[in-house]
Image (cartoon, rainbow, N blue to C red):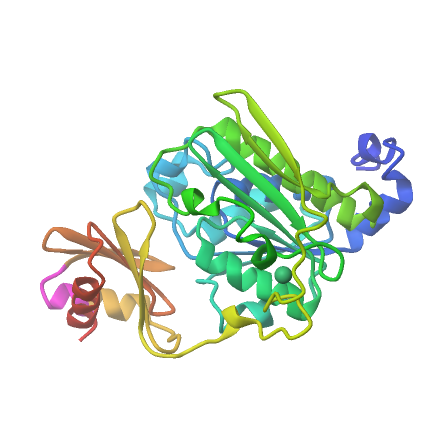
């Protein structure tokens, strides 16, 4: 146990003081997919004090190719990623305090979730959530590290409120549009490369070695052997609505009501009720069976077969409807099943 962090403290930029800092810090990881599992594993092994991990999904077979930490058993049992990741991380380092939530991050809940953390790591797969992270980062003055990958292509950037431009400043300078949908597949080494950039930057932030931070936007294509590091020091915009003088945090504007969204590249629609509810899974399962649906459950979710579609319903009333991209249809299915 005593030697656990010896190789890390021997590294002079960290040392014993840096290690003590790492062990005091709290990190929020948003998403527990490929980037989320890889970042979480590295920070857990590094001995970070506390990790909060939030994810809205459950483990599927197609995740196992790149989402390290998940096992065949997790996919077989359809375990929510938040539950599986906590179990596996605790087995790696029981000293790290870990809170894992099965939740959809949105404008109404991220601010409360992020409060008290020293850093946020973006491990999402969509820009809707990244804009919310960006605004919360500026509002609460918490650094965040952007990371994205698709195909053999990856990118990363570190946002330090008050020091660097934010993502909203960068929007016009970088061709993000091609990165918004995971339709081109992905190879696992890209995940590792983006994670290496994110977690190295995370460690610098945790040991408070601000001078060592990379100030560039990094992009690379591992298959085609391209690497670019773009200087962003002049990209900060005074009129930016997220970090400028007259900021309004435009992405935190939350309107309530039932929300549906297509999950990019997945033939899946997410339906979120106006307010979270606390469903009794066993009761719901017996009602569904009584109504003639084919359904099975674990303690966290119910899996329902409906005509050609499959619907997975979580305890908080949120549902993933697989097999469709039609939001209106998904909403009808949801309302029909939940009465
Ligand atoms: Zn900005």
* Total numbered badges shown on the rendered structure: 0
Q: Quadrant of residue 5?
A: top right
Magenta stretch: includes residue 63: no
Q: Position of residue 85 (x, y in %)?
A: 52, 47
Q: Position of residue 45 (x, y in %)?
A: 69, 39
Q: Quadrant of the N terminus?
A: top right
**Closer to the camera in the image, 2 or 121:** 121
| Residue at image location 35% in from the left, 47% down from the top | 78
Residue 45 shows in this picture:
no
Q: Position of residue 234 (x, y in %)?
A: 70, 50
User: Is residue 71 found left or right of 201 in the rendered image?
Assistant: left
User: Is residue 324 found left or right of 159 in the rendered image?
Assistant: left
Q: Is residue 325 placed above or below 316 in the rendered structure? A: above
| Residue at image location 81% in from the left, 34% down from the top | 8
Q: Quadrant of the C terminus?
A: bottom left
User: Is residue 83 found left or right of 97 in the rendered image?
Assistant: left
Q: Quadrant of residue 295?
A: bottom left
**Closer to the camera in the image, 242 or 80:** 242
Q: Is residue 303 placed above or below 230 in the rendered structure? A: below
Q: Which residues are magenta?
A: 287-293
Taking the image in four quarters, ligand 1 sits in the one at: bottom right
């Amino acid at each position: 146990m005593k030697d656990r962090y010896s190789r890390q403290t021997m590294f002079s930029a960290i040392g014993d003081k840096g290690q003590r800092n790492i062990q005091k810090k709290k990190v929020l990881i948003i998403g527990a997919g490929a980037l989320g599992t890889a970042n979480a594993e590295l920070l857990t092994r590094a001995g970070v004090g506390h990790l909060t991990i939030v994810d809205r999904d459950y483990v599927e077979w197609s995740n196992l190719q790149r989402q390290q930490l998940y096992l065949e058993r997790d996919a077989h049992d359809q375990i929510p990623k938040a539950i599986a990741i906590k179990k596996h991380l605790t087995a790696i380092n029981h000293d790290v305090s870990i809170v894992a939530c099965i939740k959809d991050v949105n404008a109404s809940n991220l601010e409360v979730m992020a409060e008290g953390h020293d850093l946020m790591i973006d491990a999402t797969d969509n820009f809707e959530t990244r804009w919310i992270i960006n605004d919360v980062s500026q509002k609460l003055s918490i650094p965040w590290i952007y990371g994205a990958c698709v195909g053999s292509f990856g990118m990363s950037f570190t946002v330090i409120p008050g020091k660097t431009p934010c993502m909203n400043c960068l929007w016009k300078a970088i061709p993000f549009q091609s990165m918004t949908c995971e339709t081109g597949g992905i190879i696992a080494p890209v995940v590792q490369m983006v994670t290496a950039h994110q977690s190295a930057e995370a460690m610098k932030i945790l040991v408070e070695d601000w001078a060592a931070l990379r100030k560039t936007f990094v992009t690379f294509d591992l298959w085609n052997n391209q690497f670019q590091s773009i200087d962003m020091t002049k990209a900060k915009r005074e009129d930016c609505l997220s970090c400028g003088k007259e900021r309004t945090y435009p992405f935190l504007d939350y309107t309530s009501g039932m929300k549906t969204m297509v999950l990019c590249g997945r033939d899946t629609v997410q339906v979120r009720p106006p307010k979270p509810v606390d469903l009794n899974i066993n009761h719901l399962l017996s009602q569904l069976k009584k109504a003639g649906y084919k359904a099975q459950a674990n303690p966290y979710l119910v899996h329902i077969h409906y005509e050609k579609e499959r619907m997975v319903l979580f305890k908080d009333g949120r549902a993933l409807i697989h097999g469709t991209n039609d939001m209106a249809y998904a909403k009808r299915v949801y309302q029909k099943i939940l009465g």
